[in-house]
Image: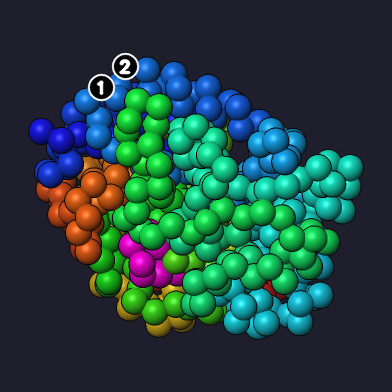
Amino acid sequence: MTLVAGVDSSTQSVKVVVRDAQTGRLVREARASHPEGTEVHPDHWWAALQQAMDGVLDDVSAMGVAAQQHGMVTLDSGGDVVRPALLWNDTRSASDAADLIAEWGGPEAWARAVGSVPVASFTVSKVRWLARSEPDLAARVSRVLLPHDWLTWKLAGCPVEATTDRGDVSGTGYWSPAAGDYRPDLIELAFGRVFDVPRVAAPCEVVGETSTGIALSPGTGDNMGAALGVGARPGDVVVSLGTSGTAFAVSDVPTSDPSGQVAGFADATGRFLPLVCTLNAARVLTATAAMLGIDLDEMTSLALTASPGSEGLVLLPYLDGERTPNLPNATGTLAGLTRDAMTPANLARASVEGMLCGLADAVDALRDQGVAPQRILLVGGAAANAAVQQIAATVFDVPVVVPEPGEYVADGAARQGAWALSGTSEPPSWEGSRALTLEPVPRPQVREAYAEAFAQVHGHLP
């Protein structure tokens, strides 16, 4: 049996899975924690990965690394880290994103150039922030990598050439998915000069090996890894409920949305991955449970006792600002407060409805870019929550499929590793997991109330 490993280096932790390269059967797994914060020194990721890999990679032939998108890892000419990495959820570069949009001819020009309009999350906005706010540190920067690039580079022994993949690099804001090439003019616009960038490897290329002889595939971003891990196909929209919420679809053609709602990413297979990201997903539920003084299981049961629409109570769940819609400085709003509506059960349900309504808006934005959803694949930690599952069927208007819980990002990285070993034109077909299918039972009043609350607070529809 040939074994492959996949890594998911996320905001909060690192997960490693080992699977059978032919069938995808899980053999073993491990994990380790990452520190909190929106900036983290990459050495913490490396220490956690080494801890998670200890004793797990015996007899593994290949591995891939998927990691959180957009993070800015800065290296000097000697390969040392210049400053802690700014992560995707660090919003301090919001004004820099706005400046870059204005300086390069507006949103339409950016959408044409790189398929996406910069927001605070994107690497291009972060490098502008660095050049503007920390010029002495910026002067030391020789190379900028993404988190998965840096981890793959470390696993390969820090070679002269670093590599990335088209999926993750499409989230920098200075690489064009349509053209398949970097835009050094945009790097210079953002940073004042051009820094070294990693080579973009082919989707199934072997880019190096570890000191123990394990072949390394190119790796990818977490959303691209999840699409590969869950086996998303055209017609599927993946809605992922982790720290952030994402809605993305596999497409054969690139997208370009000047509104900035849909990021025109590439995927990990040679196709494209139009994606909408929200900053607030599973933590909305845990924050609500904490406010109610109960655990998540109790909050789930409580939410299911309330009626659809939560008797008019609406939560706009922008607890950490928001990326889509682009409201980096927004805060959460609880609307529709009446004496009858102010119950713990309604608040519990409103938190679930608010989280899912934001993602239903994201699916509608994908529709505007030509995506025709036939089913929703609901994944991520919060997808296993019974209240989330039942309420999702009232918010989305196509069947909702909930695969068995799994580490889909790490699974996608492992599948990419198996692909690199096989040398075939497409990734290997792995055994699918059992899934729960929920037929839609739309409650349009839920989304209508959400849209009305948004318009009242922010002056326009979401």
Residue 30 visible from this viewpoint: yes
Q: Which residue lies at the image location 73% right of the left edge and 47% below the top edge?
A: 142
Query: Does the CB distance between marks 2 and 1 fall below 8 Å?
Result: yes
Q: Is residue 325 above or below residue 381?
A: below
Residue 203 image label: none
Residue at the spot of label 2 = 55
**Quadrant hosting residue 60:** top left
Res. 276 in view: no
Identify the magenta region: 267-274
Q: Is residue 219 above or below residue 31?
A: below
Task: Please identify the dominant SS of the magenta region.
Answer: loop
Residue 157: percent from the left, percent from the top?
50, 32
Residue occupying the far front of the picture: 160
Residue located at (65% from left, 83% from top)? 108
Where disc 2 sits, the SS reads loop
Instruction: Give the colouring mode of the picture.
Output: rainbow
Mark 1: which amino acid? Asp
Name the quadrant of the C terminus.
Answer: bottom right
Instruction: Tell me the kind of residue under disc 2.
Output: Gly
- The quarter in which the N terminus is drawn is top left
Q: Secondary structure at mark 1?
A: loop
Q: Say whether residue 191 is left or right of residue 346.
A: right
Q: Position of residue 389 (x, y in %)?
A: 30, 50
Task: Tell me the residue that label 1 is attached to.
Answer: 58
User: Which of the pair 309/122 is nearer the observer?
Assistant: 122
